[in-house]
Image (tube, grey):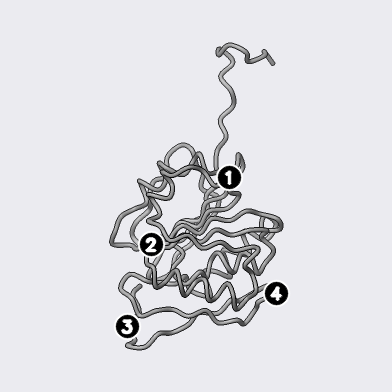
Amino acid sequence: MSRAQSTPGSVRIIGGRWRGTRLPVADMAGLRPTSDRVRETLFNWLASILPGARVLDLFAGSGALGLEALSRGAREAMLVERDAKLAESLRQSVAKLRAEGEAGVVVADALAFLRAPLHGRFDIVFLDPPFAADLWPAAFAALPPWLADDAWVYVESPFTLEPEPGTAFRLHREGRTREARYALYRRVTLPADPSEPGVPPE
């Protein structure tokens, strides 16, 4: 949901060590921070997974998802944002939180980033692109090399749209607001084919 105000707003971190800290939200078409209610639900789902996790926030925007994850115990977050002004705002938020050693900001198109050399594998990925761009299929297709074997992927989409992630992912939880569907998927690690050379029989 695009912001209608003519002046920048803010979104707050709702849990963890930075609870209550406000992050700036620019007045920009397509910038639609995940609501407090949805983030609270999502991070309840992720509570046992977050400690020590590596997190990738692919369409970072305000950084609300990636920085909330760090606030609640993630070890590292990479925030990918295409717009240079938003990326600079993200860097300022990271500096405000004194989180430079934990949060990295990358100025890049998310899909181009996924086609670049790996920056390691991630335990949790936040996939909340601008709704009008229909980037879910391309992102799903490019994600697997970046994912830990038991990775989790959070997906936000319009209320009426259920992006199909394919057989590499299994739906874990989902919910809806009046504006959006939000869902958490787990990566499916397929068992080795016993007919392949070098695979021992059970």
Which residue corresponds to mark 4?
Answer: 17
Which residue corresponds to mark 1?
Answer: 121
Pick whichever of labels 1 and 4 is earlier in the sequence: 4
The amino acid sitting under disc 3 is Ala
Pick whichever of labels 3 and 4 is earlier in the sequence: 3
Q: 1 or 31: nearer the eye?
A: 31
Above or below, 182 relative to 63? above
Tell me whether circle 3 and circle 4 mark residues in contact (CB < 8 Å).
no
Tell me whether circle 2 and circle 4 mark residues in contact (CB < 8 Å).
no
Badge number at residue 4? 3
Q: Percent from the top left, x then y, of residue 36? A: 53, 75
Pick whichever of labels 2 and 4 is earlier in the sequence: 4
Residue at horizontal 62 percent and vertical 67 percent from the top: 100
Callout 4: few (<14), some (14-19), or many (20+) C-alpha neighbours within 10 Å?
Answer: some
Element under disc 1: loop
The amino acid sitting under disc 1 is Arg
Badge number at residue 82? 2
Residue at horizontal 33 percent and vertical 60 percent from the top: 160
Alpha carbon distance from label 3 to label 4: 31 Å
The amino acid sitting under disc 2 is Arg
Callout 2: few (<14), some (14-19), or many (20+) C-alpha neighbours within 10 Å?
Answer: some
Alpha carbon distance from label 2 to label 1: 21 Å
